[in-house]
Amino acid sequence: MTSRNIPPLLEPYLAIQPSQSQSQILLTGILGANTNWLLLRYLYTLLKSKSSQTQRPQPQPQGQRRLGLRIPVAAEPELELRATPTTPAQNGDNEEGDESVGVLLVSFLRDFAFWKESAGRLGLDLEGLGRRGKLGFVDGLCCGGGGSGSGSGSDGEGAGGGGLPVRRPPVPSVGGAVGGGAVPGRGPPPAARPAPATAGGSSSSQGPAGGGEKWKRSLPSLAVADVSKTLHSALDELCQKNKKVVLVIDQLDFLLAATSDGIGSVSSALKDLLLDLREKSHATILTLSADDPLIASQATTLEKDHASFVLSLAHEAEMIVSLRLLDTGIAKDVSGVVRITRGGDCCGERQIEEKEYLYHVGGDGGVRVFERGQ
């Protein structure tokens, strides 16, 4: 299972070492060579022990059977005394070692259904991990869709300033309209009926997206202040349940592109936000776009902001894993090139060996990483 889910050549780079406190790992991709499969392998490495622990068979009590003969446990107390203290200790060690790391996944371009389906192919149950307090998810795609859970906003302004407008289906035309396209007069709208009070005394769900699933959240708007408040709240909740929390943010550059003001204030605010979040998390994994028009050209204000943002994060990263297409064109058995390099902040105890491999993503989601010439 490990050979299929985690390519052996990438195993040394996917593990988060205890010495990597407040470190930052940067994953970059381009059009045609995205970082989805690589980020899923990081999630699998961080969460695989938690998901497999629930499937681990419980040890059978000793002394029940010996060579096909039934022997009461009381008849051999030395076996009972030997089995009693070791089993709880082993279970305690597993809980402390395997379940001491939580993951906060923040996604700006892909919803939870995508990550759930993709991680399920690797054997990860994200729903179960979220209910157990080992995973938190912040949906940056459905902005303003689950802040209160009631969905009572009547117009796009309910999403808060700085967010994207909420699209609503067109109102069907009423038959028999008066000439000129005028809508016939209507009476005053009916008064809103209060929802019937439940046994707990609450009339509507005032929680994160997903009803009672508090580990799922959505951004009230794309304003940096609202993003900061939501991420700090989700991170604090995970830190209370786990000794270490790894922050994973997918496509943070989308937030920069959607809210950039052209003078660099949004880029500076996002950098300050990342510094604050890194102080609370054990490690941070970021995915960004690094296409040539966004990095090399810098013809527009957005391209200049994007290039400055990506380059500054690269200088603060401990390791950079970049994906690109083949320089010679498209090949049937090669999807692209993965390159591992040291970042500008590679001053820790971890020694990063720079490498460049080829990779191929199969139709079933499996990934093969190999060296040139193999």
Image: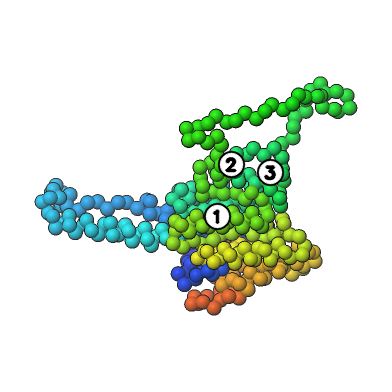
> Residue at 22% of width from left, 56% of height from top?
84
Instruction: Find the distance from the CA under tag 1 to the CA under tag 2.
Output: 17 Å
* Direction from residue 112 to residue 164 in the image, left or right: right
Q: Amino acid at mark 2?
A: Gly
Q: Secondary structure at mark 3?
A: helix
Check residue 158 in the rendering and tell me which mark sits there, or answer none.
Answer: 3
Q: In whole angstroms, how far apart are the C-alphas of marks 2 and 3?
A: 12 Å
Q: Which of these two is toward me, 143 or 303?
A: 143
What residue is disc 1 on?
A: 233
Drawn side of residue 338 relative to residue 69, left or right: right
Which mark sits nearer the N-terminus, 2 or 3?
2
Is 306 on the left or on the right of 284, as rendered?
A: right
Residue 353 appears in the figure? no
Q: Amino acid at mark 3?
A: Gly
Which SS class for mark 1?
Answer: helix
Q: Measured from the top left, where is residue 320 in percent x and y?
A: 59, 70
Q: Is residue 125 left or right of residue 342?
A: left
Q: Which residue is mark 2?
A: 149
- Picture residue at 27% right of the left edge, 53% below the top: 59
Residue pictured at 48% horizontal, 67% vertical: 16
